[in-house]
Image (tube, grey):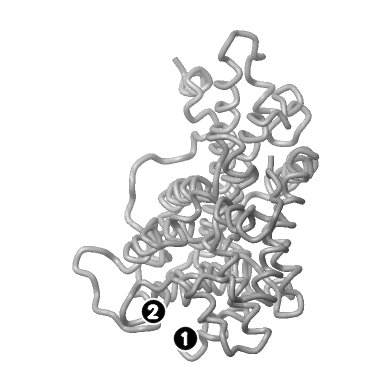
Amino acid sequence: MGKAKQREMDGNCAYGAELKPGARAPARYAAGAVRSRGRRFAEPDCPTRSPFQRDRDRILHSTAFRRLIHKTQVFVFHEGDHYRTRLTHSLEVAQIARTISRQLRLDEDLAEALALAHDLGHPPFGHAGERALDRLMGAFGGFDHNAQSLRVVTALERKYLAFDGLNLTWETLEGLAKHNGPIVEEMHAPVRKVIRALESWQSLEPARWASGEAQAAALADDIAYVSHDIDDGLRAGLLTLDGLRDAPLAGSIVAALPRAEAPGLRSRLTYEVTRRMITLLIQDMVQESRARLAALAPGSPDDIRAAGEAVVAFSSGMTSDLKALKDVLMQRVYRSRKVMDVMDDAEAVIARLFARYLSDPVVLPDTWRVAQEGLAERARARVIADFVAGMTDRYAIDQHRLLFDATPELR
């Protein structure tokens, strides 16, 4: 039997013929091929782990990471046990980032650390919470979840005797700061404000691209959320398999599958769409990135940073298809009445909590009340934003019930 026919039958890597199984030695352009630029506060090396493995482990053991289990991805935690949360999303991003890094001979541990940390700064209720906090903080410097992730790992985690934050490596901080690319546009202003506090240590070189590992982790985020939001949208009844037949990227995958008729087949087909989409996206990225790496011929991680454009990327055709699919998800899932009704109520919960804490700080928990005492209003607002952003969905709901007579059900 021909290899192409076998792939068609088993479906395992129907789109992944170019992917090479197994681990290979990192390339000279991998971050782990040279010595890390170090940590803000000097620490002795660990005898059993690389610097990036230590970063990954510190992120995994952080309080902020544990809280992601009860933070919304698209659907609030109590709407169903099988919908993704920020925690399950982060784990899925990490798995995809490792796969991409292995194929491109990048440092898998750095890519994994960045994937696990990229959403640490997300407030409760997903992007609804972020919109609310950004609006409330408009007069005090705004709010951005990427900037907040940096605040978490550089200041807000308080576990160690010698320093605040997690004291992560320069490379991990660089990757978090540049999750959306070089920090050059006005949209990156909140991130710039956070990294200014680090400038006395080492510049994160904001105008340059990040490492290949950071680029891989950022695109792994896109792959994970698009494919898995389709899965969650199908579970919620906001999407149907037949309705996806006209959707870019997903349509060709659905068309190649049998129609759901037998009992129990629909859930299997839903998973089939998700896994085939992930494989298709990874294969396209690996092929395009290998071509770009071959043309650039980088001899070090800095050659990738100085390339002037992304080196880890989708093809132009896939980029267009992915953007069109995101537009479909925006209209049919994220802006659906079912989701928007809940998110409107969620924004109101965040707004009421923030306003109450700012006007009546005595209701804050003792640690946070002390932290904002004696500060100017702008600084006080930032402390309160840090507190609210760190809440889980259920903690925010519980706090609202304590402080107000009525709390929306968020269903």
Q: Residue at x 55, y 41 (%)?
A: 84
Residue 274 image-quadrant placement: top right
Work out whether 199 lies above or below 389.
below
In this view, the residue in front, 316 or 408, is 408
In this view, the residue in front, 182 or 262, is 262
- Tell me, yes or no, if residue 135 can be seen here: yes
- The residue wearing badge 1 is 202
Which SS class for mark 1?
loop
Residue 72, position as x, y percentages in the image? 60, 49
What type is the residue that disc 1 sits on?
A: Gln
Work out whether 92 lies above or below 120.
above
Crowd tier of the residue under label 1, counting other residues whose Cα lies within 10 Å: few below 14, some 14–19, many 20 or above: some
Tell me if 42 is positioned left or right of 401 in this view. Answer: left
Please, which residue is most extreme toward the top here?
Answer: 262
What type is the residue that disc 2 sits on?
A: Arg
Work out whether 376 lies above or below 365.
below
> Which mark identifies residue 37?
2
In this view, the residue in front, 304 or 207, is 207
Q: Quadrant of the N terminus?
A: top left
Please, which residue is most extreme toward the left here?
Answer: 47
Work out whether 329 lies above or below 177.
above
Q: Quadrant of the C terminus?
A: top right
